[in-house]
Image (cartoon, rainbow, N blue to C red):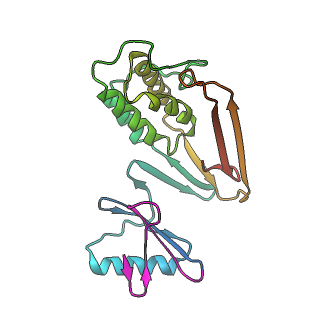
Amino acid sequence: METGKERFHSISSQSCFLHLDHCYNLTIVPVYVDDILVVGNDVSQVSHFKSVISNHFKTKDLGPLKYFIGLEVVRSPSGIFLNQQKYAPDILDDSGQLGSHPAPFPMEQNLKLNDTDGDLLPDPTPYRQLVGRLIYLTITRPDIVFAMNILSQFMHAPRIPHMTAATRALRYIKGTLGQGIFFSSSCDLHVNAYIDSNWANCPTTRRSTTGFFITLGSSPIS
């Protein structure tokens, strides 16, 4: 997308455009169908982009971000809270687990899932859809990332134990709908990384499994 002598270009995604000028003012424009976010570190450049785009397309400025493709943004003087409290109940409802009893954690401790135990699911589609939707939930739920990493390994041929584990993850989500990620406005900008590994832990490949957690100050980013 070109605006005069300036150019917005995607470097790694066909739905995310970036512009960096010679003063290192950055504008980022994620696009999803007809929904667009405009963020940047220079207000005048953001306003310029919105002006240019409105001259070429019929647009409506909804103001500060509150909700975007299942992601809710709540601002306060102490920081920004991201959550998916509207998206998660939809998963529970579509899966018939809206009235289920909450589970205290997303996956049984020491559970070893593999691709041979248990009968194959007659129809793998519900499992694939469920795990895919739960993976999207990990945007604001790092507490279920490990479970989703395990469950996503069996998308090609899911079995009954895999669906049982996925259902337990749903029951955990039922009891933690208010969970999300908080980005403090007062934290420092130091990057901290934590990593752990379990030697030869994978029951299928016997490879080691590794996990990591990265924060910017006190805010989780990966």
Say left or right for 141 vs 200: left
Reply yes or no: does residue 13 show up in magenta.
yes
Q: Position of residue 126 (x, y in %)?
A: 31, 28
Residue at 39% in and 76% down: 50
Q: Main secondary structure of the magenta part?
A: loop
Q: Nearer the viewer, residue 195 or 134?
A: 195
Q: Position of residue 213 (x, y in %)?
A: 65, 43
Residue at 41% in and 33% down: 131
Residue farthest left in this picture: 58
Q: Position of residue 58 (x, y in %)?
A: 25, 73
Tell me: residue 159, above or below residue 134: above
Quarter of the image containing the N terminus? bottom left
Residue farthest bottom in this picture: 5
| Residue 70 visible here | yes
Say left or right for 68 vs 103: left
Q: Position of residue 156 (x, y in %)?
A: 37, 29
Residue at 41% in and 78% down: 49
Say left or right for 191 vs 147: right
| Residue 176 visible here | no
In the rendered picture of this protein, how many numbered marks are placed on residues? 0
Tell me: residue 131, above or below residue 29: above
Name which quarter of the figure residue 61 lies in. bottom left
Magenta part of the protein: which range? 1-23
Name which quarter of the figure residue 167 lies in. top left
Residue farthest top in this picture: 118
Reply yes or no: does residue 9 show up in magenta.
yes
Tell me: residue 62, above or below residue 218: below
Residue at 71% in and 56% down: 187
Name which quarter of the figure residue 10 lies in. bottom left
Q: Nearer the viewer, residue 113 or 68?
A: 113
